[in-house]
Amino acid sequence: MVGMIDQVLAGAVIAVTLMCLARLALRRRPDPEVPPAGRSVDFAHASMGIGMTAMFLPQVLPAGVWAVLFVANAAWMGGLALHRRPARTYLHHLVGGLAMAYMFAAARSHEPTSHLLSLPTAHSSGHAHGSSLTVVEAQPAGFAFPLVAWVLMLYCLLSAGFAGTDLLRPAQTCHITSTPRLTAATEVVLSLGMAYMFLTML
């Protein structure tokens, strides 16, 4: 069941990522009808989708490199929030970039560790002697600071919920971008995907 959920989410994340990349490629020249927020949101979604795809698939880059890239992305979004409006759009993606950076930097995988276990052994002389047995066990997966992961997971769930409400609104009243339903659907997929990743790695 978990494997099927992974496959469905991975497929959905890859699909929306390709869609965002296609929209960015088609917008080679600035379009006066497309607000700057729309292009920035597409870029933020595309970068987040690429990072999430990297977590579903075998990693091409070390986790530390991904973390640095998403910190830089978050810093860029913070700069945009200072100069553009609505600032909440950029602040949301700032949090998303930091969440991705945390996911790459703080996640612990199942790594085997060795321990020596002393066992008494009896010889024919009747004396007990100690012998060591090497025990290999795996460290549990998780995060360096689980509370931060829980908070970010809840934030992702709330983000998916708010984006879901945008899908229910009339197109002209949705405030995200000029293509609100597509952007809201992308936000739902990526936010749910991130929440699921945090949950399975806790």
Image: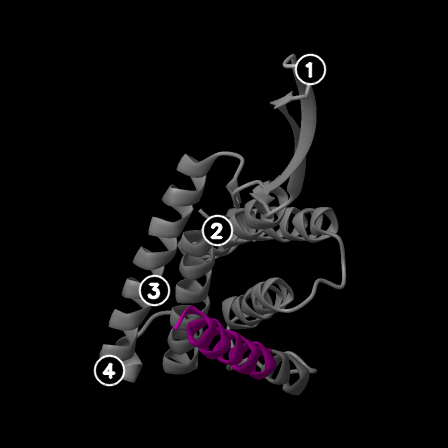
The one of 156 and 140 positioned closer to us in this rendering: 140
Mark 4 highlights which residue?
Answer: 170
Q: Residue at x 56, y 44 (%)?
A: 102
Marks 4 and 1 sit apart, C-alpha to C-alpha, by: 88 Å
Marks 4 and 3 sit apart, C-alpha to C-alpha, by: 18 Å
Q: Earlier in the sequence, mark 2 or mark 4?
A: 4
Q: Residues within 10 Å of mark 3 (few under 14, many from 20)?
A: many
- Tell me if 25 is positioned left or right of 78 in this view: right
The amino acid type, in three-letter code, at marker 2 is: Met
In which quarter of the view is residue 47 placed? bottom right
Marks 3 and 2 sit apart, C-alpha to C-alpha, by: 19 Å
Marks 1 and 2 sit apart, C-alpha to C-alpha, by: 52 Å
In which quarter of the view is residue 185 placed? bottom left
Mark 1 highlights which residue?
Answer: 125
Q: Earlier in the sequence, mark 4 or mark 3?
A: 3
The amino acid type, in three-letter code, at marker 3 is: Ala
Q: Residues within 10 Å of mark 1 (few under 14, many from 20)?
A: few
Mark 3 highlights which residue?
Answer: 160
Mark 2 highlights which residue?
Answer: 201
Residue 86 appears in the figure = no
Q: Earlier in the sequence, mark 1 or mark 2?
A: 1
Quadrant that contains the N terminus: bottom left
Marks 2, 4: nearer the viewer: 2
Q: Secondary structure at mark 4?
A: loop
The one of 201 and 110 positioned closer to us in this rendering: 110
Q: Earlier in the sequence, mark 4 or mark 1?
A: 1
Contact? badges 3 and 2 (CB < 8 Å)? no
**Range of the magenta residues?**
1-20
Q: Residue at x 75, y 53 (%)?
A: 62
Rendering coords of residue 129 (x, y %): 67, 16
Q: Secondary structure at mark 2?
A: helix
In the rendered image, residue 2 lying in the magenta stretch gets the answer yes
